[in-house]
Structures are given as structure tokens and as C-alpha cells.
Image (cartoon, rainbow, N blue to C red):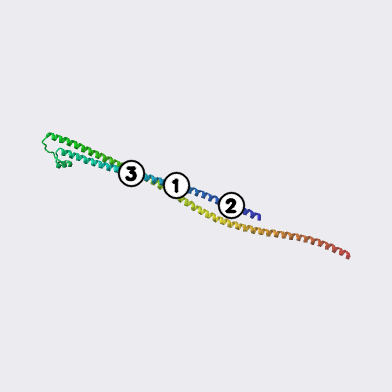
């Protein structure tokens, strides 16, 4: 009986050790997974921080470059417009001076500048031809100046269009980078959720492990108590067996003595009978 209980105790202790080892392996695996996830989280945070810094720096540089380019184009356009206005004014003044030299009156010159002058009768043909030549030259000069002004305005407009295109491209690039940042942020949030999930699972398993460990400790204590009681009862049984063996031995001795005494008394009785006869 004692041997059977010892075998059961050994089997229970072995099963308990296997359960503890299984829990320890599971906890080590969870700790390893949590460590890997934390490393992945740190790597994502570093990449996100680096990408944010690079994106902000690049965006700031592009904005500064676009603002500087726009400022330069505006300054060039304003300077060119001022120059063309000045050239137009000078051209008009030169034309007015030539008209004045050609003996046009101030009223006629102002009417010519407004474009509503009328042909006048001039008596001298040479003077008329000279005036016509000068007017043709002045008109060509004014037309050329106007064409130059138009070309400069168109060039400035094209530069502004190019800058607007660059700004639009910068906006698209910023939108794409923002999308990448959103994707990275979403991955970071998912990683945090996974970490929270595994941490919660780890806490639950660790709590279960502690509960089972407490139960195992209680079972071990109960088993130790049962073993102690078995040992005590075994000692009592052995003591009783020993006492029983002693009593059996004494009884055998008494029986032997009784048998020996009975034989002696029988011989003594026979002897007495013979004596009496």
C-alpha cells in the first residue's frame, strides 16, 4: 500500500513539473514575441520620426525655394514692367518732341497720343513727306515698343504659370508624403494594438499560471500532509505488526511451555499411580 502511494505521488509530482515547464515555455515564448513586437515598434517609431523630419525639412526647403523664385519673378516682372512703362513714356515723349519739331501744336500732339487725330492740310509737300516719314518711324517705334511690352508680359505670365505648376507639383508631392505618413502612423497604431493585445494575453496567462501555481502548491502541501499521515500510519502499522509478532512469539512459547508442562504432569501422574499400586 505504501509503495502504491509513493508511485502515485511520484506520478503526480512528475505531471506537476511538466505543467510548470509548459507554463514556463509559454511565458518565455510570449516574452520573446513581446520583445520582438517592441523592437518592431521602436523601429517603426524611429522610421516615422526620421521620415517626418525629412519630409518637413524637404517641404520647408521647397516652400522657401518656391517663395524665393516667386519673389524673384515678381521682382523681375515689376522691374520689367517699370522699364517698359518708362520706355513707353520715353518713346511717347520722343514722339511728342518730334511732332513738336514738325510744327504740330500741343492740341494736335495730345490728339495724336490719344489716337483720334485727323489729317490736316499742309501746303508744303516736302514738309508733308517729312512729317509722314517721321510719323511712320514713330508709329513703328511705338508698335515695336508695344510688341516688346506684350512679349515681356507674356514671358512673365509663362513664368508665373511655370511657378504655379511647380507649386501644384509640390502640393501633390506633399499629399503623397502625407499619405505615406498616414500609412506609417496606421501601422504604428496597429503595432500598439498588437502589443496591447499580447500584453493582455500575457497578463491573463501569467495570472492563470500564478493561480495554477498556487493550486499546485496547495496540492503539494496536501500531498505532503497525506504522505506524512501515511508514514505515521505505516509506522503505527509496523509497530503493531512488531507487537503482534512479539505476542505471537510469546504465545508460541507459552504453548510450548504448556505442552511441556502437560507432558510432565502426565508422567508424574503415571508415576504416582504406579506407586499407589
180 and 55: which one is in front? Answer: 55
In the picture of the structure, the residue carrying the numbered disc 1 is 46
Q: What separation in Å lies between label 3 and label 1 (alpha carbons)?
A: 32 Å
256 and 203: which one is in front? Answer: 203
Q: What separation in Å lies between label 2 and label 1 (alpha carbons)?
A: 43 Å
Q: Is residue 164 visible?
A: no
Asked where in the image residue 103 lies, by quadrant, the reply is top left
Is residue 5 found left or right of 32 in the rendered image? right
Q: Is residue 224 visible?
A: yes
Placement of the C terminus among the 4 image quadrants: bottom right
134 and 262: which one is in front? Answer: 134
In the picture of the structure, the residue carrying the numbered disc 3 is 68
Residue located 58% across and 56% down the image: 217
Label 3, secondary structure: give it: helix
Is residue 212 found left or right of 257 in the rendered image? left
In the picture of the structure, the residue carrying the numbered disc 2 is 17
Marked residue nearer the N-terminal end (2 or 1): 2
Amino acid at each position: 500500500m505504501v509503495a502504491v502511494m509513493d508511485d502515485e505521488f511520484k506520478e503526480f509530482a512528475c505531471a506537476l513539473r511538466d505543467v510548470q515547464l509548459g507554463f514556463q515555455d509559454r511565458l518565455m515564448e510570449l516574452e520573446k514575441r513581446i520583445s520582438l513586437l517592441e523592437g518592431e515598434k521602436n523601429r517603426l517609431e524611429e522610421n516615422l520620426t526620421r521620415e517626418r523630419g525629412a519630409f518637413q525639412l524637404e517641404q520647408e526647403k521647397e516652400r522657401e525655394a518656391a517663395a524665393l523664385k516667386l519673389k524673384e519673378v515678381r521682382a523681375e516682372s515689376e522691374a520689367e514692367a517699370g522699364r517698359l512703362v518708362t520706355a513707353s513714356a520715353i518713346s511717347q515723349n520722343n514722339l511728342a518732341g518730334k511732332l513738336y519739331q514738325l510744327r504740330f501744336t500741343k492740341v494736335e500732339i495730345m490728339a495724336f497720343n490719344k489716337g483720334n487725330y485727323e489729317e490736316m492740310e499742309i501746303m508744303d509737300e516736302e514738309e508733308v513727306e517729312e512729317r509722314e516719314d517721321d510719323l511712320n518711324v514713330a508709329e513703328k517705334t511705338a508698335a515695336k515698343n508695344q510688341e516688346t511690352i506684350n512679349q515681356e508680359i507674356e514671358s512673365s505670365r509663362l513664368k508665373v504659370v511655370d511657378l504655379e505648376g511647380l507649386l501644384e507639383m509640390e502640393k501633390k508631392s506633399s499629399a503623397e508624403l502625407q499619405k505615406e505618413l498616414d500609412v506609417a502612423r496606421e501601422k504604428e497604431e496597429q503595432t500598439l494594438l498588437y502589443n496591447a493585445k499580447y500584453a493582455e494575453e500575457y497578463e491573463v496567462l501569467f495570472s492563470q499560471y500564478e493561480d495554477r501555481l498556487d493550486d499546485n502548491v496547495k496540492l503539494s502541501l496536501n500531498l505532503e500532509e497525506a504522505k506524512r499521515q501515511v508514514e505515521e500510519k505505516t509506522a503505527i502499522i509496523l509497530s503493531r505488526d512488531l507487537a503482534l509478532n512479539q505476542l505471537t512469539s510469546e504465545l508460541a512459547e507459552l504453548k510450548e511451555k504448556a505442552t511441556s508442562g502437560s507432558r510432565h504432569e502426565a508422567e508424574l501422574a503415571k508415576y504416582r499411580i504406579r506407586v499407589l499400586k
